[in-house]
Amino acid sequence: MTYELRTYTAHEGKLDALLARFRDHTDGLFTKHGMPSIGYWVPVDRDDTLVYVLKHDGDPKASWKAFQADPDWIAAKAASEVDGPLTSEIVSVFMDPTDFSALS
């Protein structure tokens, strides 16, 4: 099992739109493509950041490829970005749990 920590920095004033896209579309599509979410967080000291963790049930690269080609994702992304991109930066870290982790 592989986990992925992702941090998104939203363009100024776009965090609410980013959160709505995740709430209304992205989270369900992640599950559809074998990468269910563990949780989502907004740091208390940043008003432009979303942090979340995914669990990859299979090959992360294949899951991401299928997700990005999904017509529902393409439509949701396009609709949410009619006024421009929502994010300025995305950072991804793949992780394996330790033998003493509650997730292992």
Image (cartoon, helix red, strand yellow):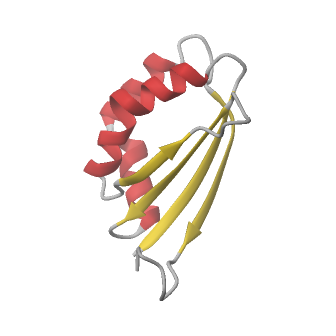
User: Is 20 drawn above or below residue 32 in the view shown?
Assistant: above
Residue sitting nearer the eye, 88 or 37:
37
Q: Residue furthest bottom?
A: 99
Q: How many marks?
A: 0
User: Is 16 drawn above or below residue 94 in the view shown?
Assistant: above
User: Is 13 drawn above or below residue 35 in the view shown?
Assistant: above
Left or right: where 101 falls relative to 10: left
Q: Residue at x 72, y 19 (%)?
A: 12
Q: Quadrant of residue 59?
A: bottom left
* Placement of the N terminus among the 4 image quadrants: bottom left
Residue 61, image x, y percentages? 46, 63
Residue 56, image x, y percentages? 39, 65
User: Is 56 drawn above or below residue 52 in the view shown?
Assistant: below
Residue sitting nearer the eye, 5 or 101:
101
Left or right: where 28 falls relative to 64: left
Residue sitting nearer the eye, 81 or 9:
9
* Placement of the C terminus among the 4 image quadrants: bottom left
Q: Residue at x 55, y 72 (%)?
A: 95
Q: Residue at x 59, y 10 (%)?
A: 83
Q: Quadrant of residue 73?
A: top left
Q: Residue furthest left?
A: 32
Q: Residue at x 54, y 43 (%)?
A: 41
Q: Residue furthest top?
A: 83
Residue 10, image x, y percentages? 66, 29
